[in-house]
């Protein structure tokens, strides 16, 4: 995914990103460096793509959380996400 436009479905990243908003995701920022804490990233889980913020990194595994802590299906339920599942960074 060099560059992709994704439409947000859900409220887990409110108020940073709202339901129905479109975001631009790119894998280019991660060609030369790894994802960092506080990056907002797209990741694949099964056949679905999610957008979450990196809150913690341990042993090359990423703990991802939605900004809306009361309404987010994230690493608190899913566990950590491996680097290979991170598709790119939200750049706009």
Image (tube, rainbow, N blue to C red):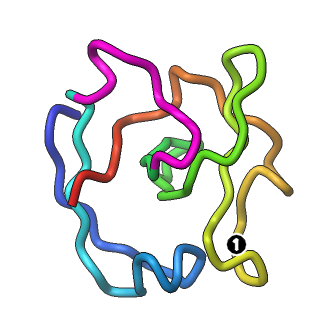
Is 46 rendered above or below residue 21? above
Which residue is pictured at 23% across the width and 34% down the height? 1
Outermost front residue? 37
Span shown in magenta: 29-39
Q: Main secondary structure of the magenta part?
A: loop
Q: Which residue was labeled with disc 1?
A: 72
Is 36 rendered above or below residue 55? above
Which residue is pictured at 17% across the width and 49% down the height? 4
SS label for mark 1: loop
Residue 92: percent from the left, percent from the top? Answer: 21, 61
- Horizontal side, residue 66 vs residue 87: left or right: right
Q: Is residue 33 magenta?
A: yes
The part of the image, by quadrant, that contains residue 82 is: top right
- Horizontal side, residue 65 vs residue 39: left or right: right
Which residue is pictured at 37% across the width and 17% down the height? 33
Q: Is residue 81 magenta?
A: no
Residue 24: percent from the left, percent from the top? Answer: 20, 57
Is 92 rendered above or below residue 44? below
Report crowding for label 1: few under 14, some 14 to 19, many 20 or more residues within 10 A (C-alpha).
some
- Horizontal side, residue 84 vs residue 32: left or right: right
Question: Nearest the camera: 65 or 46?
Answer: 65
Which residue is pictured at 49% across the width and 43% down the height? 43
Residue 17: percent from the left, percent from the top? Answer: 41, 77
């Amino acid at each position: 995914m060099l560059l992709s436009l994704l439409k947000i479905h859900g409220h887990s990243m409110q108020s940073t990103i709202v339901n129905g908003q479109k975001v631009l995701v790119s894998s280019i920022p991660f060609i030369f460096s790894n994802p960092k804490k506080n990056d907002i990233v797209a990741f694949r889980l099964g056949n679905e793509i999610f957008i979450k913020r990196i809150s913690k990194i341990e042993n090359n595994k990423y703990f991802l959380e939605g900004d809306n802590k009361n309404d987010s299906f994230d690493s608190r339920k899913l566990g950590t996400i491996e680097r290979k599942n991170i598709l790119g960074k939200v750049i706009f």
